[in-house]
Image (cartoon, helix red, strand yellow):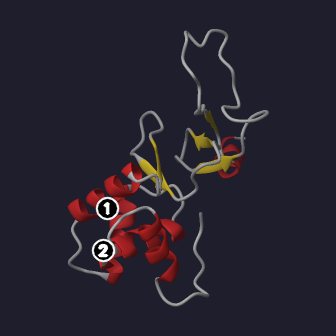
């Protein structure tokens, strides 16, 4: 789900919030738009972006909006081991992530093979699977070139 800046200002964010059943407020619009500009953003990064537009915005209000968005299915939260929680607007397609073990850069990677959940465990233990989450770890091209 993406929004475009070609629409009326904030229309994409407002429409997305309403469609998710959330009340449209200026802080929520600012958080949503920050996520559109910052894929795989931490709450701190979103707060920094929101603060440029709304200097009095608190980190707690950003966390509240991100929690509301996650609960409503509007954003996806990823938690790479050893890293801060990250948030993204790309939802509903069961994609995975590449994470650089040196600089922490995160990149989307489409589903590994086949239809969701992409990977099938050797024993599902009776679970009905709906998705699989995979994190690939390694060096991004920039860090790999420095290490070479």
Instruction: State which quarter of the image contains the C terminus.
Output: top right
- Give how far across and how far down residue 60 sits, in percent: 21, 60
For residue 27, the mark is 2
Residue drawn at x 52%, y 77% is 12
Compared across the picture, whether 83 is left or right of 145 comes to left
Secondary element under disc 2, as helix, strand or loop, is: helix
Q: Give the residue at mark 1.
A: 65
- Give how far across and how far down residue 112 sits, in percent: 74, 35
Q: Are marks 1 and 2 in contact (CB under 8 Å)?
A: yes
For residue 107, the mark is none
- Give how far across and how far down residue 70 sits, in percent: 40, 51
Question: Badge 2, how many Cα within 10 Å: few under 14, some, many 20+?
Answer: some
Residue 109 sits in quarter:
top right
- Give how far across and how far down residue 9 sits, in percent: 48, 88
Q: Is residue 116 above or below residue 72?
A: above
Compared across the picture, whether 69 is left or right of 101 comes to left
Residue drawn at x 59%, y 33% is 131
Q: Earlier in the sequence, mark 1 or mark 2?
A: 2
Question: Badge 1, how many Cα within 10 Å: few under 14, some, many 20+?
Answer: many
Residue 135 sits in quarter:
top right
Instruction: State which quarter of the image contains the N terminus.
Output: bottom right
Q: Is residue 144 above or below residue 11?
A: above
Compared across the picture, whether 95 is left or right of 17 comes to right
Residue drawn at x 28%, y 57% is 63
């Amino acid at each position: 789900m993406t929004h475009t800046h070609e629409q009326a200002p904030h229309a994409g964010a407002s429409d997305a919030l309403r469609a998710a059943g959330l009340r449209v407020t200026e802080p929520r619009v600012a958080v949503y738009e920050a996520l559109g500009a910052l894929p795989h953003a931490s709450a701190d990064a979103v707060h920094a972006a929101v603060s440029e537009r709304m200097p009095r915005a608190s980190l707690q209000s950003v966390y509240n909006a991100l929690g509301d968005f996650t609960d409503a299915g509007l954003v996806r939260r990823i938690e790479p081991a050893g890293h801060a929680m990250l948030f993204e607007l790309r939802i509903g397609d069961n994609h995975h992530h590449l994470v650089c073990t040196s600089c922490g850069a995160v990149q989307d990677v489409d589903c590994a093979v086949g239809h969701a959940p992409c990977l099938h465990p050797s024993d599902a233990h009776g679970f009905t699977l709906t998705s699989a989450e995979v994190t690939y770890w390694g060096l991004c091209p920039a860090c790999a070139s420095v290490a070479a």
